Structures are given as structure tokens and as C-alpha cells.
Amino acid sequence: MDYPNSYDVIVIGGGHAGTEAALAAARMGSSTLLLTHNIETLGQMSCNPAIGGIGKSHLVKEIDALGGAMGHATDRAGIQFRTLNARKGPAVRATRAQADRVLYKAAIREMLENHPNLTLFQQGAEDLIVEGEECRGVVTQTGIRFHSRTVILTTGTFLGGVIHLGMQNQSGGRAGDQATIGLAQRLRELPFNVGRLKTGTPPRIDGKTVDFSVMEEQWGDDPRPAMSFMGSPTEHPEQRCCFITRTTEQTHEIIRGGLDRSPMFAGDIEGIGPRYCPSIEDKVHRFADKDSHQIFVEPEGLNTHELYPNGISTSLPFDVQIEAVRTIPGFENAHITRPGYAIEYDFLDPQDLRHTLETKFITNLWFAGQINGTTGYEEAGAQGLLAGINAALRAQEREGWYPRRDEAYLGVLVDDLITMGTKEPYRMFTSRAEYRLILREDNADLRLTETGRNLGLVDDERWRRFNEKREAIETERQRLDTTKVSPSSEQAGIANQYLRSPMKDGMSLSDLLRRPEIQYEHLVEISGERADDETVSDQVEIQIKYEGYISRQQADIERLRQNENRPLPVDLDYDAVGGLSNEITEKLKAVRPETIAQASRIQGVTPAAVSQLLIHLKKRD
Ligand code: FAD
């Protein structure tokens, strides 16, 4: 049957990408349908119950600045919060929160159910309605035809999913959920390039059977950071301790003894797994000289005894899992509540997408999340948000939008994916961004809230609070610039206690703060005043201390932007460009970059090759 209502946007899949996509589209005023297998699993964390971490919290804060859900849900579900790299520079500082799975799902579901313009429907999507080269809707498992202007596909690890546990395997989207088969076949018939990837999860442990006294305790930070710009520690539920233990020589021996029954080592898994998050059997095999690996023992929630042993993801047979786990200090009598397993699934080559995540071959169809070859909730959520924004813009007949690499980690993520594709599950690292000092997690709100407001994503309350903060930063910077300390004053006496060499001439408070030995707290002592809000003083301190480096990066960006404005014609004959190696010519022909800047980021395309392209374009003009 044809469903009586038609929608601006249909989102398939209620994971991290799908929920952000649906919420973004609905926030922008589009009538949105979120179609998912099971309403009970909306926002489900398939693997570790944690949000954020290095590189990843940058994405969460960007999602948040654009009005998204992940930061809010984390503040409502977080049972332990920490700032990672607190002693390192601001570019690599990151917030990480352990989350209660049930509270996280509940927070996401509440936002979805109470959002205007957003409708939920529980059923699997079996097919896409494609007319010519345009997507027009979705057909469900029972044959209901939903019509829409745009469709976003966010099916995660479900497409053709196969779960491996030892030598046994079965079809599944993740443990306990059916795989998506019909739609996977349909996508293979359409002109997309499909590949296989793999990921895995550790066995879960019953905390009642664990001896915590032999493990190292790890508490969260005090004071606690919040994840959302609008969040506060007062929202956080009760906080919990995590623990640290380690594998032993004996654990490794048992694992080595089970490798002949490992689907990975026996060749049953063809998909490539995440290099930076390897299974324990992989770690034992690859780092044979290491006699121990660290395990973070993390609670799964407030009302459960289940624990997530972070660091021992495995698809070894269950008998090997139980034997190996019981050689780990504290786990001698451990009961496994859920076996670890690996999952193989289809992903679609992200080089078939535009920067907006719309597919190149079928208009009005977007892909977001794990389906594009990424791994991680944060990477999925960020893509979902971008796809949701662009589907809503299309429905409103507005131009598409995406952030550049120098504006957001989301810009880096998407540009990396569509330019280079990926051969293994892609996760975000701060090292992937060229302009790390500009793309900090602490300034995500300053970088993106205004854009979010213009797109229709940021509500009045956030906008008001954001403007207050922006003005407070400006006022504080002016105070530090204009407050002078004369060398003969009492304030200079205080400053001299901290300065490496005493003041000779008058200095402003900003000048003093530029000195490496002076911190904002010293200025408070010198001037007797401070900004009301710590996030304001932190921001001002970072802006002033790193001013030199920041302006240098901004100058680099400016230079690149001049090139970015130079489009590369789609029909450019790369064989006719002089001075390019065959390899580079082939790469350019395969990717067909839209701009010079995009060409420059293709692996192997050298600055010299970029110069040749520029010369060729000049000759053509
Ligand atoms: P998902 O969260 O998978 O959500 C997909 C959604 O689509 C689900 O709601 C599903 O029901 C729905 N759906 C699928 N097909 C259909 C259909 N045809 N019709 C309707 N609805 C459909 N990430 C890490 O960062 N580190 C890890 O160590 C890690 N390990 C993992 C281990 C396992 C076993 C699994 C399964 C995942 C792991 N992940 C890990 C990945 C992480 O869970 C994903 O990156 C993230 O959940 C992706 O979000 P998503 O929204 O793209 O997809």
C-alpha cells in the first residue's frame, strides 16, 4: 500500500547517525519520518558505553554547536566524566564520558518522541523507490510504500551483517538484531561500490563475580566537565568508578592456543577491522613481545552489574574466551554474561558521495554513519547531522552546506572520506586535522553556532546564551588589553613574583599573559578581577597565549582558500596535463576532484603536481 502522508525527509535507521539526521531535519522544519527496525533500540550503543575521547569529543561538541542531540544525551546519561590530555595543549584536550546505556537510549528517545515535525515508524526498509536517477521514497518489509522528497540511509553494521563467534557464524545486524538483507542486495544492484568491513566487541562480565580489590581505581574528574554547551554537571546522574586491570602471560598463552579456531586467523572473515582498535587475539599476535595489555573495566550503567572490559574485543570461541578471561587479575571467577563477537558488514565506498553526503549517482539520496566506512558513535552522529541538514535544505530548495577542513572536524571527516575513501574502519584522530589549533573542542561553539543559527538548527535559548558568552569574551579581552600595569605600581610587585625577569616598562594584562610563566590566575591576583564564567576566562587565556600560532594557521588557510576557489572542470583531460606521473594522473582521473584544494589532499598528489595543474588551468583559461 501507499502510505497516505508523504514526507520531506525519510531517515532509515535509528542509530547514532539516523537519530541526529532525523532531529536535524525536523529542527529545520522538514516533515521527517524515522523508519527503524525497532523503536526500543533507538540510540543504542552497540559497543562501548562511552562517548567522546580524543578527536571524538571534538565531533560531539561540533554536533552540539549545531543543535544536535549527542552532547545533551551524554550529560543526562554520563556516569563518569574526564578531561583527557588535561596537561597537554588545548588542541588535543578532550572530554570523555562513560554512559549508562539505558539512560542514554532514554534521553535520545525522549528527544525524538517530543520533537515537532518528527514521526517514528517501526519496520525494516526493504527497498528504495528510485525513479530514473532520483530517490523518491522507501518500501518496507511488509510492502508499505512511504513517499518523500529525500531519503537518508543510516543502516550501520546491519547491511549483509554476519556475526562470528569462533568457527560459528550467523546472519545478524549486531547481537540480538536481524541483519538487513533485501536492501543490501538492492544497493549492490544500484551503481554503488560495495565493500566489506569488520568490527568486534568484548565479552561482558557480571560485576558480582569480580574482585575489584586487586584492580586500580579510576574516578572521574572533580570538578566535572559537561559535554554540551547547554549542559551542566548538575544534570549528571550519580557518578561511578572505573577500574584498570591487565592481561597476563597466561592469558596470552590461552589466546595463542585458540588462534586456529579464530575466524580472523582461519580466514573466515574477509572484511578489514579497525587498526586502532584491534581484537585481543590480534594484539597478542602482532605485539608478541608484550607480555601484558591494559584493560579498562567500565560499568555498563547504574542499575546493572554488567561490566564492559575495554581492550579485549574478541571473536575467539566461547570456551577460549572464558578460559582467557579467568586468567586476568580480578576476573578469576568471572561469569561472562554475553560472549564477545565480531561482525562483518557491507559498507559503501564514500568516494561515491559528494561533500554533503548525497550520493553522486542517485539524487535526493544520502548515506551517513558506519555505512560509509567509519566506526564510532561520534563519527556516525556527525555524518547523520550533516546529511539531515542537507536533506532538509534540498526539501526547502536551498543550497547545500558542508564545513571546510579549517572550520570543523566534521569537515575533515567528510573530506577525508569522499576524497580518499577508506580501506579500513575510519575513526577520527586529532592528527587528521591540519589546523588543530583552530579546531579545538573548547571553541566548537564559537566556530559553528552562528552557522547553525543561520541554517535553522539553533534555538533561541542557545542563541541567547551563546551571544552572552561571545560578548563576555570580547569584554574580557578588552579589559586585559586596556588594563596597564606600571613598573612602579603595587601590581607590578605582584607580577614580578611570577615573571622570570622583573618588569622594566609598563605592560598590559594581555602582554603579561603572553609570557609563558604567567597564567590567568596570576592576572586575577594582579588586577583583583576575573571573568564571571570560567569558560570565558579559559577561552580568553587560550586565545591570547596561542595568538601567534593561531594567526600563522589562519594565514595558511587564507592561502589555501585562494586555491580552493579554483574549480577543476569535471571533464578536465588529465592526460593532457604536462609533468604529471602516470600514478598521479590515474588518481586524479579516479577521484575527479572538484577543486584544486581537494586535488592537493589526494594521497600521493604532490605540491609539484598541484603547480602543474594550476599552470594547465591558466593555459586553458
Ligand atoms: P548503528 O548504530 O549500527 O545503527 C543502525 C540502525 O539502523 C539501527 O537502529 C538498525 O536497527 C537500523 N536499521 C538497519 N537496517 C535497517 C533497515 N533496513 N530498516 C530500518 N532500520 C534499519 N565503534 C567504536 O568506535 N569502537 C568499537 O570498538 C566498536 N565496536 C563495535 C562492535 C560491534 C559488534 C558493533 C556492532 C559496533 C561497534 N562499533 C564500534 C561501532 C558503533 O557501534 C557504530 O560506529 C555506530 O553505532 C554507528 O552508528 P550508525 O548510526 O551508523 O549505525
Image: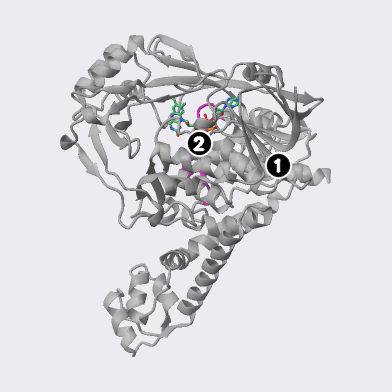
Left/right placement of residue 201 relative to residue 413 reads left
CB-based contact (under 8 Å), mark 2 and mark 1: no
Examine the rendering and report whether any part of residue 216 can be seen.
Answer: yes
Task: Name above or below for residue 409 compared with residue 517.
Answer: above
Tell me the magenta residue range.
422-435
For the N terminus, the quadrant is top right
**Which quarter of the picture shows residue 208?**
top left
Tell me the element at label 2: loop
For disc 2, the marked residue is 43
Tell me the element at label 1: loop
For disc 1, the marked residue is 31
Give the residue at x 48% y 49%.
72
Amino acid type of the residue that numbered disc 1 sits on in the rendered structure: Ser
How far apart marks 2 and 1 lie (CA) works out to 20 Å
**Which quarter of the picture shows residue 488?**
bottom left
Q: Position of residue 98 (x, y in %)?
A: 37, 42
Examine the rendering and report whether any part of residue 415 can be seen.
Answer: no
Give the residue at x 32% y 48%.
238
Q: Nearer the viewer, residue 499 or 256?
A: 256
